[in-house]
Amino acid sequence: MSWVKNTFSSSIGRKFAMALSALFLMIFLLQHFVINFTSVFSETVFNDISHFMGTNALVQFALQPVLIFAVVYHFAMGFALEIKNRNSREVKYAMNKGQANSSWFSRNMIISGAVILAFLGLHFYDFWVPEITTKYIEGDMSGMINGEYRYYHEMVEKFHDPVRVGIYSLSFILLAMHLMHGFQSAFQSMGARHPKYTPGIKKFGNIYAILIPAGFIFIALYHHLTSH
Amino acid sequence: MTKLDSKIPQGPIADKWTNHKNNIKLVNPANKRLIDVIVVGTGLAGGSAAATLAELGYNVKAFCYQDSPRRAHSIAAQGGINAAKNYQGDGDSTYRLFYDTVKGGDYRSREANVYRLAEVSANIIDQCVAQGVPFARDYGGLLDNRSFGGVQVSRTFYAKGQTGQQLLLGCYSAMSRQIGKGKIKMYNRHEMLDLVIVNGKARGIIARNLVTGEVERHSAHAVVIASGGYGNVFFLSTNAMGSNVSAGWKVHKKGAFFANPCYTQIHPTCIPQHGDQQSKLTLMSESLRNDGRIWVPKKKEDAEAVRAGKLDPTNIAEEDRDYYLERRYPSFGNLVPRDVASRAAKERCDAGYGVGTNETGEAVYLDFSSAIMRYGQEEANVKGYHNASQTQIRELGEKVVEKKYGNLFQMYEKITADNPYKTPMKIYPAVHYTMGGVWVDYNLMTTIPGCYAIGEANFSDHGANRLGASALMQGLADGYFVLPYTIGDYLADDIRTGEISTDLPEFDEAEKAVKDRIDFFMNNKGSKSVDYFHKRLGKVMWNKVGMARNAQGLNEAIAEIKQIREEFWKDVKVPGSAEGINQELEKAGRVADFLELGELFARDALEREESCGGHFREEHSTEEGEAMRDDANYTYVSAWEYKGEPSDAVVHKEPLVYENIELKTRSYK
Amino acid sequence: MSAHKGLNLTLKVWRQKSQKEKGQMETYQVSDISPDSSFLEMMDILNEQLIEEGKEPVVFDHDCREGICGSCSMYINGEAHGPGRGITTCQLHMREFNNGDTIYIEPWRAKAFPVIKDLMVDRSAFDRVMAAGGFVSVNTSGNTQDANAIPIEKQKADEAFDAATCIGCGACVASCKNASAMLFVSAKVSQFALLPQGQVEAKERVQNMVKVMDEEGFGNCSNTGACEVECPKGISLDNIARMNREYLSASIKGE
């Protein structure tokens, strides 16, 4: 299997792997959004789905590790490539007009990416770490607290804090920027480009990049404003 | 006279090349590995030769002054490449291509060479397609052809306006393959500064590494000069800035005869000079003359007003315009050959009718307005607009013209900031190609054994004038299909020679001469830059040895060039040091050679008391100003032998024998 | 051609004696530059001036001066080949500038393109990538099959031509924030992948060329598209996508 190693250590192979992990993350983000969105209209539906996702073996032991791997790979390789790319130009230009030929988003994926990473840290601290602790360390797989599902309340509680909502919203704006370039870039990296379809992919990518993060922000604001 | 043996094989012209190939000596594959060949220049000729020789098994050392072989000036050729494929079924044949080339060259080329060129032309296209050269194709997927000036068939293969680029990249690819294999050792950014002769044979070169400044010795069993033409002797030309005569001139000084230096092609459709700061002229494809009409104002006062910027050419009434080519040459009109069109433009400008805004007023109009209106009307008819207004017709016509020439119009607008759809283009002739060059025999060997010259660097197959789309053909024919065979005949005797040592005294001597010259330049306490002298030389060449020449002017030119040369050696200033990159030092060496060539050029023009092709002597013209050839006395090649000063050069004559083509006067009336 | 009204300009030019030595920006003044002059003619005037003052002229690559050889390579005011699209430095004219402007002139910057002197860089990495596979393995024989033996769909032939118009100037590398050479390499890979003559060894070609490209120290492509915008020949990003496809399929299907 040395061809696998060779392929994924080449520049194009790494691009491809970045794109693959990105696609996986984008699908994950979509389902995450759909589940979260149910909380806006139904506490029960949200709780039921959350409990299912939190306790289903397939999700927990097959998809979750893949997700973790994708997240770790995407960030680690993102930083590794950024370092390599920076080293590819040792002396910088005294005068450079990047804006003349490319978008800010595309040139600053590392900035938007780093902010998203920081946010993920917070997000893991808020939700994932307590979840894992409760379930796998304390062994409480019931998802219950005082006789009812805890998921909805835990979420709403977090959105009480205006600072957290602010950070949350800002992070999603950066995510939108990341996706503005990232969505269509993933297709290009995989060689999926065609004069007939690429304009559509780009359009869809832009809609996705704005709609999904905006939706997450909406959910946060909704709970912040409606809960007491 | 006995010194020149053209080695033309016996037999009927159509069999000469085949017979010759069957009879020359070969080198077996195992022995080719023992033989080194140096190729100087990596354009179409040098690139194709280097690749092919390496494929055959020789160890090739290729040299170019550019940073990559891909940048040689063959890359700038626009129009196309001729080949007698007869894909269009319009009656083309090897014989017709041969005939057209000899006639186009005004009967001053060697029949056997031209026939061979026509013969191998078809192979070139096959070879290039196999290499992946993306020629233009029609909707059926087959190769497309266009027609070019001076011929009656469509035999020009092309790749949009970038045929030279695509062909050169083909050569470069083939070379790259051999470089990867280690069969070609590529020396980029190296300039050949002398030829080394050992026991009468070319055995190596002295080259300067332009990056480190080091002077290096390179040995080989044969040396191939493929360094292009010398149009830059005029300072302003369509050649690349670095194009030079030095490699050719060095071998000339070491004993190779230099043939027909005065045969220069001046292309009629170039963008005129804008002023003194100009460094380079840009060609506009000849194809424009298919639809553009050339004119100048009929009245001198109109011309003056235009030059002063007080009159817009579009406001000059139709009856006040002089379509001088249509007037003088009613049957060919704007499509007369390059040399005729160029001289006619000069004649009008000299008479005071030029429309250029520069100091000299040198420019004429190339006007597309009638083509635009004609095409527009056709379009309107096709589309059924029966009451179309003039503006609508013009718009439709502009679209048609844009489809045909869009990229050229755009290029023109980029350079001049004038919109050629609205106002006529301004054009003026410029030096473009040199038919003359190092004399070679049928095997492409110079008068120095083991030293070959190919492509534009040799005196070539074009006689006194080259047809459009034939330069690419010749370069590739020489490199792919002629030299690789003929060089074997010579190298067959070298299989036991072994590697040539660079420690031989001949190398010491040549290297010392090169170093001395570099030292001279670096230590000369002059006050004028190299360009100062080059520009002065260019002015003399253009004014007195340019499109129209006469004995008085040529004699003056000879004296003036000598004068400039003497001043150059006294007063040239080369800044910096000889270690490392020094572009001024490079230029100094090249201009020093141009200053010698220029004088020989003028002498050759003076000696040739006739007008033929690109060489026009005012004394030898009809009352209407048409060229008069003198076949009785000048049907020969002038091959000059170096004897020290250019004024001491001795001419040898190779008579040109026409057995297959009857000599006729070219007429375009 | 406008009436001669000379421009006075301040130039900030990168000067570097050799690859080993450090360089710095130097400031020069030029005056009375004709707006009809090309950018390189303006550089010629600067050099004449420097020679007169007993200084070393600025070294820069240039040759054909008509936009086809790919020699010229200046990063002007923050852009490869300066402002304007679809042109090389030699096709840039001074009328694009205003009297009194300050112009920054720098060499291509990339680890794979070390500066030789001043504005001249070493682009031989491109040649090495070419030597790794930028060719069709066919010997010169004169007996290859007839040029019309294999018809090629016009659209394919045109696309191959468009890819083949790359002049190898390196503006793509210079403009890319990652100094990636993907556009250059993909143009050559595409040209041959589109033609039947090149398809025979397409798999090996793309793998070998990418391998050398990576070894030469170019950065990774992150699809910003700057290369396509700054390319004087308008080489399309389609080629990069095609190379990605070719490479991935070669990796999966190849030996």
Image: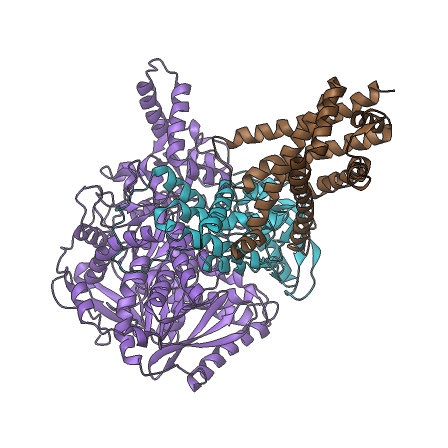
Chain colours: A brown, B purple, C cyan
Q: Indicate left or right for A112 with B155 as reference.
A: right
**Residue A114 picture quarter:** top right
Q: Residue at x 71, y 41 (%)?
A: A113
Residue C137: percent from the left, percent from the top? 36, 58
Q: Quadrant location of residue B42?
A: bottom left
Q: Is residue B257 visible?
A: yes
Rendering quarter of residue C6: top right
Residue B604 shown left or right of residue B402 in the figure: left
Residue B208 vertical position relative to residue B323 in the rendered view, above or below: below
Image location of residue B290, percent across then percent down = 31, 37
The front one of B502 and B33 is: B33
**B325 or C152, which is in the foreground?**
C152
Asked whether C89 or B345 is in front, the reply is C89
Q: Position of residue B326 (x, y in %)?
A: 28, 36
Position of A48 with respect to B569 (left or right) is right
* Position in image of residue B164 (x %, y %): 38, 51
Q: Nearer the viewer, residue A77 or A158?
A: A158
Which residue ends up furthest to the top in the rendered image?
Answer: B387
Quadrant containing the C terminus of chain A is top right
Tell how many labels. Answer: 0
Q: What residue do we see at 47% from left, 57% from top?
A: C130
Q: Is residue B92 above or below residue B367?
A: below
Q: State whether residue B468 appears in this view.
A: no
**Vertical relation: A38 (above or below) B56:** above
Above or below C199: residue B636: below
